[in-house]
């Protein structure tokens, strides 16, 4: 049975920087030795950040090679704006083709002053050539980084893709957005993953200082897509009349979950309301069904998730995934600037599961202040084996800095067991 080539990096320990020039984030690297020259990789990078002051910037970017080369749409410039100690979730999506001589993909960062903090990092690279050749993967992007396109108060579809499924398979669709604030007025960007008349998930984030650049990922599972032409779009508009935001980059990808030997998924549009301050609550039980899975084979499983946090007031909601009760992603914080914001959160996890009995895959959330009636809605969770229904033998390389570190291609030595390579 073949495995897909996949590289995962997770760091849940946190790290800080005071550098005012770009430096590597320690351990946040997708190593060239684990990827194949001339192959295409779908790359997801998600991280949660904070800053020691409310007035200084923190910048992050993904680069390739030793030069290094900035990867499209990956650079963010984040001003904390409000209360110190409230973490923001960012996410970036891109398809990268390794050159003839493979290159490292590295997360870098700097601050304008003060101390920047990363609370958690998830990095995932999935080799997609064989999936695409079999009709199990589609991708589109719209790169305006050289000349950003000004948003209007009318929705505009940027990155788009169209394909015709078989009518029975389940699909995971990922949409990445990078937007720029070109003025200072207090306005927001409205972004949606559009599927015809269906415009969920939908997010709204504020960028109220000139130069602020944000990157976010929206995710959704679409079960049993109809056997007709299906179009998906990254749609964005200005939320207000000031026209102070630009489109820099969008990317959209669709993955057929039935291409994998085992998979499970859940999509819930309705809201989960939190009951107790700073207390984890499982978001995928009873009516929400979750993504529990009964593996038919022992091996590695990937979980990809997302949700929208319409926080009431200047508060924090958090979202993460547990696989067999173990936190495999670290929390993704959603701190909003305005009571009207709908902040996106996303992340991924990787864990080795044994065949036989049902395995619990849960979304877990937490709210800082329930007096403002916070909730998380439009929640998507997909879990799938790295074992493919057909295809070439692959490799799994994984680094878990928060759980004992990389033990080599054979797996990870850590308290939660081993991940076999």
Image (cartoon, helix red, strand yellow):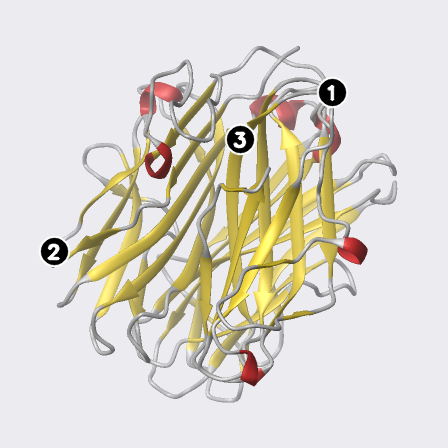
Q: Is residue 46 left or right of residue 176?
A: left
Badge 1 or badge 2: first in the primary sequence: 2
Badge 2 or badge 3: first in the primary sequence: 2
- Number of disc labels: 3
**Disc 2 vs disc 3: which is toward the camera?**
3
Please name whichever residue, 201 or 68, is drawn nearer the observer in this view of the structure.
201
Task: Classify mark 1: helix, strand or loop.
Answer: loop
Q: Which residue is mark 3?
A: 351
- Say few, some or many: other residues with alpha carbon within 10 Å of mark 1 (under 14 / 14 to 19 / 20 or more): some
Q: Is residue 102 visible?
A: no
Q: CA distance from mark 2 to mark 3?
A: 34 Å
Task: Classify mark 2: helix, strand or loop.
Answer: loop
Badge 3 or badge 1: first in the primary sequence: 1
Q: Does residue 372 sit above or below 122 in this rendering?
A: below
Residue 202: x and y in percent read: 63, 67
Q: Residue at x 48, y 59 (%)?
A: 216
The reply to whether dot 2 and dot 3 touch (C-beta < 8 Å) is no
Please name whichever residue, 232 or 20, is drawn nearer the observer in this view of the structure.
20
Q: CA distance from mark 1 to mark 2?
A: 48 Å
Q: Which mark is residue 19?
A: 2
Task: Classify mark 3: helix, strand or loop.
Answer: strand
Q: Does residue 73 sit above or below 180 in this rendering?
A: above
Q: Which residue is mark 1?
A: 296
Image quarter of residue 91: bottom left
Q: Is residue 39 left or right of residue 273?
A: left
Image quarter of residue 300: top right
Q: Residue at x 60, y 37 (%)?
A: 324
Residue 170: x and y in percent read: 77, 39
Residue 296: x and y in percent read: 74, 20
């Amino acid at each position: 049975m073949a495995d897909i080539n996949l590289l995962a990096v997770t760091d849940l320990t946190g790290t800080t920087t005071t550098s005012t020039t770009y430096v590597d984030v320690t351990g946040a690297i997708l190593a060239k030795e684990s990827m194949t020259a001339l192959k295409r990789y779908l790359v997801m990078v998600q991280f949660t950040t904070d800053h020691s002051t409310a007035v200084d910037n923190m910048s992050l970017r993904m680069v390739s090679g030793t030069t290094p080369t900035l990867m499209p749409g990956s650079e963010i410039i984040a001003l904390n704006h409000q209360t110190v100690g409230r973490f923001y979730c960012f996410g970036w999506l891109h398809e990268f083709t390794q050159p003839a001589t493979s290159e490292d993909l590295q997360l870098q960062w700097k601050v304008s002053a003060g101390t920047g903090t990363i609370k958690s990092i998830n990095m995932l690279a999935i080799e997609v050539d064989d999936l695409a050749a079999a009709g199990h993967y589609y991708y589109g992007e719209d790169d305006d980084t050289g000349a950003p396109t000004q948003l209007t108060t009318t929705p505009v579809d940027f990155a788009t893709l169209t394909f015709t499924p078989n009518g029975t398979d389940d699909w995971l669709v990922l949409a990445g957005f990078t937007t720029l604030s070109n003025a200072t007025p207090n306005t927001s960007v409205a972004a949606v993953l559009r599927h015809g008349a269906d415009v969920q998930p939908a997010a709204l984030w504020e960028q109220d200082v000139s130069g602020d650049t944000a990157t976010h990922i929206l995710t959704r599972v679409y079960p049993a897509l109809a056997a007709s032409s299906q179009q998906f779009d990254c749609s964005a508009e200005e939320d207000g009349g000031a026209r102070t935001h630009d489109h820099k980059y969008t990317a959209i990808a669709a993955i057929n979950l039935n291409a994998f030997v085992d998979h499970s998924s859940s999509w819930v549009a309705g809201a989960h309301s939190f009951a107790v301050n700073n207390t984890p609550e499982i978001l995928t039980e009873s009516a929400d069904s979750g993504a529990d899975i009964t593996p038919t084979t022992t091996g590695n499983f990937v979980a990809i998730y997302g949700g929208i946090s319409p926080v009431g007031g200047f508060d924090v909601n958090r979202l993460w995934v547990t696989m067999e009760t173990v936190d495999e992603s670290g929390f993704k914080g959603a701190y909003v600037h305005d009571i009207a914001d709908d902040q996106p959160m996303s992340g991924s996890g990787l864990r080795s599961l044994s065949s036989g009995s049902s395995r619990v895959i849960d979304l877990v959330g937490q709210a800082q202040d329930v007096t403002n009636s916070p909730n998380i809605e439009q929640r998507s969770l997909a879990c799938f084996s790295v074992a493919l229904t057909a295809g070439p033998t692959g490799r799994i390389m994984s680094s878990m800095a928060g759980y004992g570190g990389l033990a080599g291609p054979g797996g990870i030595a850590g308290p939660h067991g081993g991940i076999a390579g």
